[in-house]
DNA sequence: CGTATTATTGACTCCATTCAAAGATAGTGG
DNA sequence: CCACTATCTTTGAATGGAGTCAATAATACG
């Protein structure tokens, strides 16, 4: 077991080009390492935070994956996003000082924390961190906009985009782009994409038959990334 | 004509509780007034910025309305949002230093500008502005999330939500909550909500017949806000 | 090994789209 | 100011993509 420490070391972290340290100098990374809380570990199904929880900071997934969930006016849950290692979360809590979504571990997961009380000082002392946080936040907004546009497209395009986008994001984080484990049920994928779980199942079969992917329960292997991408990229 | 000036006066602005000055002290407002570029005026159809334009800052609508438009992989345009006086725009450009959407005046419009080159200094000197910009950005994200969830609901709920949400936002800005002019065609409303223009037309008629609203071309009068809200609020 | 959850598959239904055609409105120039 | 044209809106009828319902099969779990 590693010795108890009250700060992380972002310099040693394999996610240093993605996570909080993105775009910062060595010195600045050292600086933020002093205030970022060390990773905590959660088991599948446990919450990083819940809707209405008081905002306590911006967080980063260190390992594992999570789902971001919000509840609508009818009481139905909606999976807004899947979070991968190195991704930041919690920006939605900056507005009213409470989180507007819940984030739940999809498997054993660890995360780091940039606590609220450090943020003011950091904004003052490390302007490049401020800029980077805006960049992260802006990136999320752009992803959300892409997702809004995607949701107007037919089911096949949505699922293809979902797989490609996961693949791209995994690749960027050093995982295999062509083989990965969906820690989501058909139900959850459907919920996220606004489709019935039966539709997801049928489309997986279709993609499988067309030899675009191989599906074995939750294990996905992409055989033909180009063709899969063409489903939502091609004109028409 | 007003004398040429190289800065605005946010203290005098009627939008001071909504726009850039939200949450700032008098002194801070004075400070940002020094760097915010005075409003420019555009005619209907003119662009505040276009996709791929170099990021030049975060902007604020001073008067009039605009539509935020992005183009998908198929070359189709999508109206992502309608922007009202006091609303900030351009956060999407912070990610890669270029705007990811176009913003187009829906009628005669004026806007102010917080230029990039001032932002670093402001982040350093006015931490509360930084926080407020994060709050604005977070608010937009939450609105986008609500919109994502909404788009999974049936057509009737989408249109009801659209009207109520516009009404709420107009009210917050001192306009009538019950009577307003939609500067959008049925086609544009449908595009925004992911509906066919015919569907929008039919639903307007339905709401009209049910005496929830009165529609006269683009002029909307909401007769029963509670019932209209109930369409997307009620369980079931 | 048995039970609960998750996934597949088929048949049927329905909401919203598409297609089509007529009607209203707004903008322009004579 | 009116006529003319382009654009936008309404309305109806037919079609279709994805949802729902239902029953079986596979997988995960204690």
Image (cartoon, coloured by chain):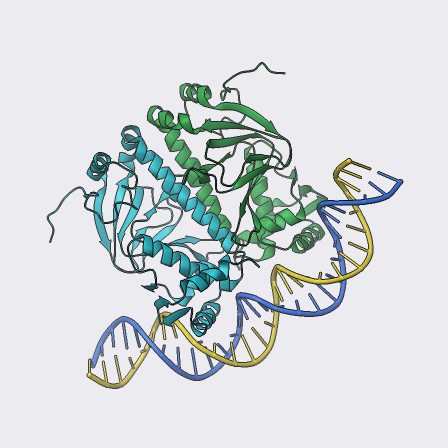
Chain colours: A green, B cyan, C blue, D yellow
A120 lies left or right of A223: left
Q: How many marks?
A: 0
Across and down, in percent, residue B75 comes to 46, 56
Q: Quadrant of residue B19?
A: top left
Across and down, in percent, residue A168 comes to 56, 40
Q: Please name whichever residue, B17 or A195, is drawn nearer the observer in this view of the structure.
A: B17
Q: Say whether residue B97 is visible.
A: no
Q: Say whether residue A194 is visible.
A: yes
Q: Quadrant of residue B130?
A: top left
Across and down, in percent, residue A81 comes to 54, 43
Residue A198 sits above or below residue B207 on the image: above
> Farthest residue in the top direction?
A3
Residue C3 sits above or below residue A39 on the image: below
C11 lies left or right of A104: right
Query: Which quadrant would the N terminus of chain B be assigned to in this image?
Result: bottom left
Across and down, in percent, residue A33 comes to 46, 21
B210 lies left or right of D23: left
Residue depicted at 43% across the width and 38% down the height: A137
Query: Which quadrant would the C terminus of chain B be assigned to in this image?
Result: bottom right
Residue depicted at 41% across the width and 18% down the height: A27
């Amino acid at each position: 077991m590693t010795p108890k420490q009250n700060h992380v070391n972002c310099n040693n972290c394999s996610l240093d080009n993605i996570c909080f340290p993105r775009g910062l100098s060595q010195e600045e990374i050292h600086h933020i390492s002093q205030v970022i809380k060390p990773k905590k570990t959660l088991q599948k199904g446990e919450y990083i935070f819940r809707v209405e929880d008081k905002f306590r900071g911006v967080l980063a997934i260190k390992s594992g994956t999570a789902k971001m969930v919000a509840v609508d006016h009818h009481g139905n849950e909606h999976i807004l996003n899947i979070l991968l290692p190195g991704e930041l979360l919690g920006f939605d809590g900056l507005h009213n000082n409470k989180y507007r979504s819940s984030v739940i571990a999809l498997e054993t997961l660890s995360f780091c924390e940039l606590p609220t009380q450090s943020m003011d000082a950091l904004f003052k002392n490390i302007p490049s961190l401020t800029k980077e946080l805006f960049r992260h936040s802006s990136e999320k907004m752009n992803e959300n906009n892409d997702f809004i546009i995607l949701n107007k497209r037919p089911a096949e395009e949505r699922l293809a985009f979902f797989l490609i986008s996961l693949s791209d994001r995994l690749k960027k984080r050093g995982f295999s782009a062509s083989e990965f484990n969906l820690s989501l049920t058909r139900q959850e994928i459907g919920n996220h994409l606004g489709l019935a779980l039966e539709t997801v199942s049928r489309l997986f079969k279709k993609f499988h038959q067309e030899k675009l992917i191989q599906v074995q329960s939750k294990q996905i292997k992409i055989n033909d990334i180009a063709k899969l991408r063409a489903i939502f990229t091609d004109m028409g």
